[in-house]
Image (spheres, grey):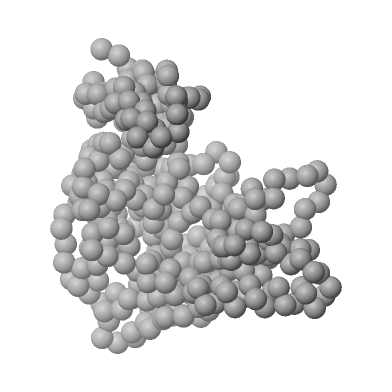
């Protein structure tokens, strides 16, 4: 019998580099992809039965991950959302952005969207608004940088800023008894814009308002690194390991690049495979896990997912639709930007792709 780490690393060979084919026919390409997956990534190679059998013992012993529960897989019960949300005010916040790459400026426009779900009879919270927006001019100094890569990082940072500031301002105006939970799209702490999300999480801790973050595309490697194979994502493992309607234990999900000294503010995560097979990561601060417990957190998230037809967050989808720029708004913004720059003397205002595709967002929210 080999170790957990060995069972994961067995697929390292023959899966990287170029796979040059004899022609460019689509059927040839599909056939080659099928071969690669069949020979290298099938479950009995990637995560063997030996791995599964050892997981309960090895995942909790000898690894540097701090697990807060002691079952490898847990069922998530089917709930009645109207009962779980009874007498609750929940606020969901998301952000949206558009990018303009032109001459002589590169510009990011971002705004937040807020939606509330209330089942209270008194002190009902009604929010359906875009309360804040921000503009960000991207300038390059010093050595030449990859502009597209720089824009992606600045865009992510800008979204972290606008979402965090929105949450702080709205909660600060409320009586804390009037808000029971804040839902946030994306990781609890953004790698780009960490300081903004950290300030927001700390503010909510001081106010005693719990926050739950939902990550739809998780690129975290906390567990895979502990298993000695950072080549794979944690979500790679849990997409195989979890079945619809199950979740992983909560664990302390620390990013070594993000220094969080306060135990209460450390990121705690659980992976959840929704009833319709969408893998998400749930992030909460440590204090929320301690004060509310895994059962209550999962009940809130599962009820939200249930309202979203068992796929994704109902509340955050509402907030996303509010924040998102419509096609009309994007085209109008592009026309106005080109007019402003033309008036300033620039005969060519946009790069080719912007003329072809219009304003677009480059962000990737998963982490």
At horizontal 70% and vertical 64% (from top left) the residue drawn is 350
Q: Is residue 287 above or below residue 182?
A: above
In the image, 293 versus 243, the foreground residue is 243
Question: Where in the figure is residue 258, as x and y percent of width and height?
Answer: 57, 45
Residue 223 is at least partly visible in this image? no
Residue 106 is at least partly visible in this image? yes
The answer to whether 15 appears left or right of 69 in the picture is right
Quarter holding the N terminus is top left
At horizontal 37% and vertical 31% (from top left) the residue drawn is 28
Q: Residue furthest bottom?
A: 122
Quarter assignment of residue 307: bottom left
In the image, 23 versus 298, the foreground residue is 23
Q: Is residue 294 above or below residue 123?
A: above
Question: Where in the figure is residue 322, as x and y percent of width and height?
Answer: 44, 75
Q: Is residue 257 above or below residue 181?
A: above
Quarter assignment of residue 160: bottom right
In the image, 159 versus 98, the foreground residue is 98
At horizontal 67% and vertical 78% (from top left) the residue drawn is 336
Question: Where in the figure is residue 11, as x and y percent of width and height?
Answer: 37, 21
At horizontal 37% and vertical 40% (from top left) the residue drawn is 235
Q: Is residue 37 above or below residue 183?
A: above
Question: Where in the figure is residue 60, as x and y percent of width and height?
Answer: 31, 30
């Amino acid at each position: 019998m080999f170790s957990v780490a060995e069972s994961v690393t067995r697929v390292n060979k023959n899966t990287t580099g170029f796979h040059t084919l004899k022609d460019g026919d689509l059927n040839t390409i599909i056939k080659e992809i099928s071969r690669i997956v069949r020979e290298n990534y099938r479950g009995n190679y990637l995560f063997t039965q030996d791995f599964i059998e050892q997981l309960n013992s090895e995942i909790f012993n000898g690894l540097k991950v701090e697990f807060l529960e002691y079952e490898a897989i847990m069922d998530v019960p089917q709930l009645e959302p109207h009962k779980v949300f009874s007498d609750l005010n929940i606020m969901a916040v998301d952000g949206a952005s558009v990018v303009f790459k032109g001459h002589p400026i590169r510009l990011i426009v971002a705004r937040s969207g807020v939606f509330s779900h209330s089942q209270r009879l008194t002190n009902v919270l009604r929010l359906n608004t875009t309360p804040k927006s921000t503009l960000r001019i991207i300038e390059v100094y010093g050595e030449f940088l990859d502009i597209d890569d720089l824009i992606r990082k600045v865009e992510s940072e800008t979204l972290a800023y606008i979402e965090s500031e929105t949450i702080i301002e709205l909660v600060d105006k409320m009586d804390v008894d009037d808000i029971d939970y804040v839902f946030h799209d994306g990781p609890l702490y953004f790698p780009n814009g960490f300081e903004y999300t950290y300030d927001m999480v700390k503010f909510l801790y001081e106010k005693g308002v719990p926050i739950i973050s939902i990550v739809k595309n998780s690129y975290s490697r906390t567990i895979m690194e502990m298993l000695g194979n950072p080549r794979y994502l944690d979500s790679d493992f849990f997409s195989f390991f979890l079945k619809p309607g199950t979740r992983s234990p909560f664990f302390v999900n620390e990013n070594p690049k993000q220094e969080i000294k306060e135990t209460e503010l450390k990121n705690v995560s659980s992976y959840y495979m929704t009833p319709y097979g969408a893998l998400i990561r749930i992030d909460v601060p440590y204090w929320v896990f301690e004060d509310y417990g895994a059962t209550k957190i999962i009940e809130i998230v599962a009820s939200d997912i249930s309202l979203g037809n068992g796929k994704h967050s109902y509340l955050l989808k509402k907030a996303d639709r509010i924040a998102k720029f419509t096609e009309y708004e994007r085209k109008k913004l592009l026309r106005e930007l080109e007019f402003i720059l033309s008036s300033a003397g620039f005969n060519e205002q946009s790069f080719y792709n912007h003329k072809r595709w219009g304003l677009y967002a480059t962000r990737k929210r998963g982490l």
